[in-house]
Image: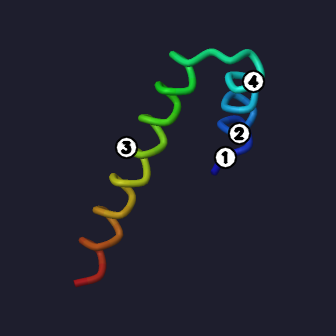
């Protein structure tokens, strides 16, 4: 997980910003899913 992303997530939790937490969480899962798909395609 990138440092800038950790900082944003930590800030959102500290401020109890549910919208930001949810948004960052969705972005992270989308990023992970996209990475898994690209890795599996490069190694048949």
Mark 1 and mark 2: Cα distance apart in space: 6 Å
Q: Is residue 2 above or below residue 12?
A: below
Q: Which residue is mark 3?
A: 30
Q: Is residue 25 above or below residue 33?
A: above
Q: Would residue 27 appear left or right of 39 to someone viewing this image? A: right
Q: Residues within 10 Å of mark 2 (few under 14, many from 20)?
A: few
Q: Which residue is mark 4?
A: 11
Mark 3 and mark 4: Cα distance apart in space: 21 Å
Q: Which residue is mark 1?
A: 2
Q: Is residue 29 above or below residue 18?
A: below
Residue 39 is drawn in which quadrant? bottom left
Mark 2 and mark 3: Cα distance apart in space: 16 Å
Q: Residues within 10 Å of mark 1 (few under 14, many from 20)?
A: few
Q: Which mark is residue 44?
A: none
Q: Looking at the image, do the residues carrying marks 1 and 2 touch, with CB atoms under 8 Å apart?
A: yes
Q: Which residue is mark 2?
A: 6
The structure residue drawn at horizontal position 22% and vertical position 84%, both measured from the top left corner, is: 44
- The disc, 2 or 4, on the residue closer to the chain's N-terminal end is 2
- The disc, 4 or 1, on the residue closer to the chain's N-terminal end is 1
Give the x, y percent position of residue 34: 33, 52
Q: Secondary structure at mark 3?
A: helix
Given this view, does label 3 or label 4 mark the residue nearer the observer?
4
Q: Residues within 10 Å of mark 4 (few under 14, many from 20)?
A: some
Give the x, y percent position of residue 9: 67, 32
Q: Secondary structure at mark 1?
A: loop
Mark 2 and mark 4: Cα distance apart in space: 8 Å
Give the x, y percent position of residue 17: 62, 15
């Amino acid at each position: 997980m990138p440092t800038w992303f950790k900082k944003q997530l930590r800030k959102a939790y500290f401020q109890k910003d549910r919208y930001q937490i949810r948004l960052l969480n969705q972005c992270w899962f989308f990023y992970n899913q996209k990475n898994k798909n690209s890795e599996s395609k490069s190694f048949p």
